[in-house]
Image (cartoon, rainbow, N blue to C red):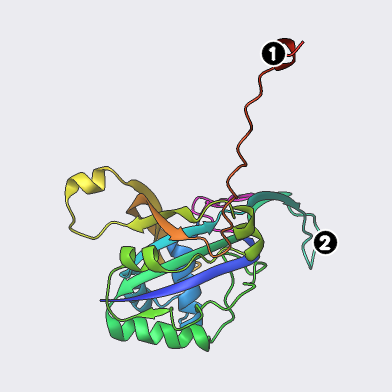
């Protein structure tokens, strides 16, 4: 199996799993359906092509939270172009200044094809919504995007911390940082391991606007520790000299 690693960073991101009608929420990390949709757009796959989507959906997905970001709420109004009738006020949520590393594990030929598509996408990528463009390239520097050997957990554990420099400097007193990883449990794994995971409805089955459908998948939350390149250990405190407040009384 090969692994494709992507960095997802932007001023705004929004990864909805239960968004409905006028209230559009976001999860705390990218959803599988959102990242698979990004890759399908990069390949130029049409929304109604469920066969091509099934090949991508079979990939195993995981994400590492390198910079959680801040939750932002926005109210939006709209007006019908033809009738000029006011549309319902909508409430939309975003993650501001967040950075994630997403990884997909699967057959080498498919992963290599996705790697090529990410570098020259048919349709421009966006981070959950069209109003959320990425601020960095999706592929990682130093040839860290495509991993021919290894599994998803190993890749997410050894990749360098991708948080913004200002965020890393905020934690400069810590030489190593703990990061949360949400990894999809392998199909057919031990039932006990599945029982310890969380169930999410973000497994894409169809992106067709006429019958958009999502299934359930199980995700396990773990933690990995990575070095902080901006670490500046605090100098040891100078020893405090001993002081006896009664010394002047003895000399009197």
- Residue 242 position within the rendered picture, expressed as x and y whole percent measured from the top left: 62, 27
Residue 104, quarter of picture: bottom left
- Residue 77 position within the rendered picture, expressed as x and y whole percent measured from the top left: 77, 54
Judge the density around disc 2: few (<14), some (14-19), many (≥20) Cα neighbours within 10 Å. few
**Quadrant placement of the N terminus:** bottom left
Is residue 55 positioned above or below 170 on the image?
below
Q: Secondary structure at mark 2?
A: loop
Q: Secondary structure at mark 1?
A: loop
**Between marks 2 and 1, how big is the CA–CA gap?**
87 Å
Is tag 2's residue or tag 1's residue first in the polypeptide sequence?
2
Residue 212, quarter of picture: bottom left
**Residue at 19% in and 44% down:** 192
Helix, strand or loop: magenta stretch: loop
- Residue 55 position within the rendered picture, expressed as x and y whole percent measured from the top left: 32, 76
Residue stretch rendered in magenta on the structure: 14-28
Closest to the observer, 10 or 45: 10
Q: Is residue 89 left or right of residue 113?
A: right
Find residue 220 and name its label: none
Residue 240, quarter of picture: top right
Closest to the observer, 101 or 161: 161
Q: Which residue is mark 2?
A: 84
Judge the density around disc 1: few (<14), some (14-19), many (≥20) Cα neighbours within 10 Å. few
Tally of numbered discs: 2
**Residue at 32% in and 63% down:** 153
Q: Which residue is mark 1?
A: 246
């Amino acid at each position: 199996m090969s692994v494709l690693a992507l960095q997802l960073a932007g001023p705004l991101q929004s990864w909805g799993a239960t968004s409905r009608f006028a209230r559009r929420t976001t999860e705390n990390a990218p959803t599988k359906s959102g990242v698979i949709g990004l890759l399908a757009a990069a390949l130029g796959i049409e929304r109604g092509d469920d066969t091509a989507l099934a090949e991508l959906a079979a990939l195993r997905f995981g994400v590492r939270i390198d910079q959680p970001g801040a939750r932002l709420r926005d109210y939006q109004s709209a007006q019908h172009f033809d009738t000029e009738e006011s549309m319902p006020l909508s409430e939309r949520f975003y993650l501001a200044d967040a950075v994630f590393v997403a990884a997909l594990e699967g057959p080498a030929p498919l992963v290599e094809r996705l790697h090529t598509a990410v570098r020259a996408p048919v349709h421009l990528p966006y981070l959950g919504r069209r109003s959320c463009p990425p601020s960095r390239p999706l592929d990682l520097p130093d040839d860290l995007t495509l991993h021919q050997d290894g599994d998803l957990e190993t890749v997410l554990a050894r990749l360098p911390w991708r948080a913004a420099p200002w965020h890393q400097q905020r934690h400069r007193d810590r030489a190593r940082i703990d990061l949360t990883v949400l990894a999809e449990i392998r199909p057919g794994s031990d039932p006990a391991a599945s029982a310890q995971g969380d169930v999410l409805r973000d497994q894409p089955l169809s992106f067709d606007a006429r019958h958009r459908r999502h299934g359930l998948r199980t995700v396990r939350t773990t933690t990995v520790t990575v070095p902080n390149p901006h670490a500046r250990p605090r100098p040891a405190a100078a020893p405090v000299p001993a002081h006896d407040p009664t010394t002047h009384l003895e000399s009197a």
